[in-house]
């Protein structure tokens, strides 16, 4: 299994929250917009940070 599975799941959920919080025009989602905005601000940078952390660790373990 790829070491990036968790990273891409967090990134996908972050983009989904970004869409629901910032871009959607659905009035039913207005009640949840603030939660999705905050969650997208947390999850997207976390996924980017995790990507580079995993990449560094993976590269270090494959090259002695």
Image: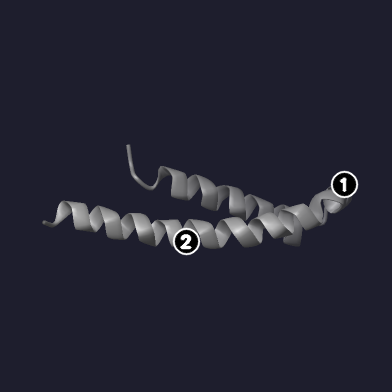
Determine the secondary structure under disc 1: helix
**The C terminus lies in quadrant:** bottom left
From the viewer's perspective, is 18 left or right of 50?
right
Compare residues 37 and 29 and report the one nearer the observer. Answer: 37
Residue 7: x percent and y percent?
A: 45, 50
Determine the secondary structure under disc 2: helix
Residue 40: x percent and y percent?
A: 65, 57
Residue 47: x percent and y percent?
A: 49, 56
C-alpha separation, residue under disc 1 versus residue under disc 2? 30 Å
Compare residues 13 and 63 and report the one nearer the observer. Answer: 63
* Count of number-bearing discs: 2
Residue 51: x percent and y percent?
A: 40, 57
Compare residues 25 and 43 and report the one nearer the observer. Answer: 43
From the viewer's perspective, is 32 left or right of 59?
right
**The N terminus lies in quadrant:** top left
Q: How is the image coloured?
A: one colour
Which residue is identified by label 2?
48
Q: Is residue 24 visible?
A: no
Foreground disc of the pair 1, 2? 2
Which residue is identified by label 1?
28
Residue at 71% across, 59% down: 38
Q: Is residue 9 visible?
A: yes
Residue at 72% across, 59% down: 37
Residue at 81% across, 50% down: 32
| Disc 2 packing (10 Å; few <14; some 14–19; many ≥20) | some
N-terminal of the pair, mark 1 or mark 2, is: 1
Residue 33 in which image quadrant = bottom right
């Amino acid at each position: 299994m790829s070491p990036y599975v968790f990273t891409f799941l967090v990134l996908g959920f972050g983009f989904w929250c970004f869409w629901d919080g910032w871009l959607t025009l659905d009035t039913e989602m207005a009640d949840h917009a603030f939660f999705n905005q905050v969650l997208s601000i947390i999850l997207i940078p976390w996924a980017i940070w995790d990507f580079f952390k995993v990449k560094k660790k993976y590269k270090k373990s494959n090259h002695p």
